[in-house]
Amino acid sequence: MPERERTIPGSIRRVLLDEETIRERVCELADRISDDYADDDDLVLIGVLKGAFIFMADLARELTVTHDVEFIAVSSYERGATTDGAVRLIMDTRSSIAGRHVLVVEDIVDTGYTLEYLLRNFRARNPASLRACVLLDKADRREVDVAVDYVGFTIPDAWVVGYGLDYADRFRTLPYIGELKRRVYE
Amino acid sequence: MTLRDDVANVLIPEETLQARVAEMGQAVNGLYDEEDDPLLVCVLKGAFIFLADLIRHLEIRHEVDFMEVSSYGVGTESSGVVRILLDLESNIEGREVLIVEDIIDSGRTLQYITRNLRTRNPSDLKICSLLSKPSRREVDVPVDLIGFEVPDEFVVGYGLDFAEAYRNLPFIGVLKEEVYTLR
């Protein structure tokens, strides 16, 4: 991937994780996943849109184990009540996951409610195994216990954007992870 | 056995692919003015890897959105009518739209998507596809940006699959005939 001078948008306070750091870590995660699933022949990665698509594209290319890729889209219910993390499944997986090894691929885990809800939902479909892989973990924000098997980076509680993560759909396609200035979101 | 063993030959190696994607990114930058705010519409699943790399080369303001469609099954191919499994999150009325596709084959699905999006009155609608198989074209769809023209062979990799496999190969390869005739 060619490196070149990039203007950091004025809304970005600092670059938290640069392209190279992300790339190396994604490779490490892919190596571990390839090892762990080496003996399983029916792995399906489920990416959660929109945030996970860049991570998924880079992770999948580094995997040496055969796998399918699926995407799901979710949206939160409009009226509050997020304590159980319930989300509306806008698009479900195309194929059944029953009896298959499922790895949920997320850009970030925060309070953990949404991921926990998704895992519960998928577990009810009787996969052979079910794990989660997230690029970023805001561990300090966790409110519900959720097992994340593969974590890229544990990061502090700041508003991060780039590499799939957005602020009001902005900054999603920055190639690095940046921390947004407080004035932008406050 | 690895997935690569099922590939008869590499049609577009990784470096060639990456260099062309970078060029296409520059070309996309040139398609829009500073006041534009195009929405890049990625047609899943095939185009997600192309999109993930294309955006690394964009310097213009833009957002991304996703659509997933499926055909209604046998007998409907000629109409090109597809079922929208996932519609856009954004309203595109009055907005510049760039459809990002992995491959254009008969052109029917793309024509349908284009027609569908046009009814929503975007201010501009353009199409960008990594690959095109001109010999397979059945309907005329004006494509603004094409990465590579490829012959009518079973191509996989870089998002393109056969029975969901091979998507993650970092190059475009031609699948061995015995692979798709045996399965």
Image (cartoon, grey):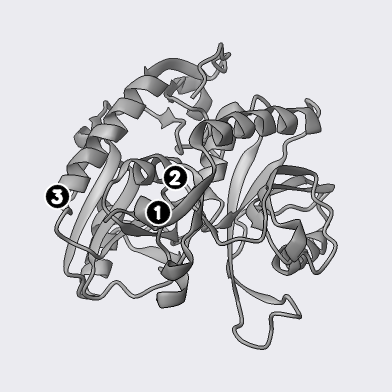
Marks 1, 3 in one chain: yes
Q: Are marks 1 and 2 in contact (CB under 8 Å)?
A: yes
**Mark 1 falls on what kind of element?**
strand
Q: Residue at x 76, y 61 (%)?
A: B135
Q: Under tag 3, what secondary structure?
A: helix
Q: Mark 2 highlights which residue?
A: A51
**Taking B89 as reference, is A74 left or right?**
left
Q: CA distance from mark 1 to mark 3?
A: 22 Å
Tag 2, which secondary structure?
loop
Q: Chain of mark 1?
A: A
Work out whether mark 1 precedes mark 3 in sequence or the reverse, and give the earlier one: 3
- Mark 3 sits on what residue? A36
Residue A84 appears in view = no
Task: Kindly report the distance in space between the C-alpha atoms of the residues bearing marks 1 and 2.
Answer: 7 Å
Picture coordinates of residue A72, whole percent (x, y): 43, 61
Q: Amino acid at mark 2?
A: Gly
The residue labelled by disc 1 is: A48
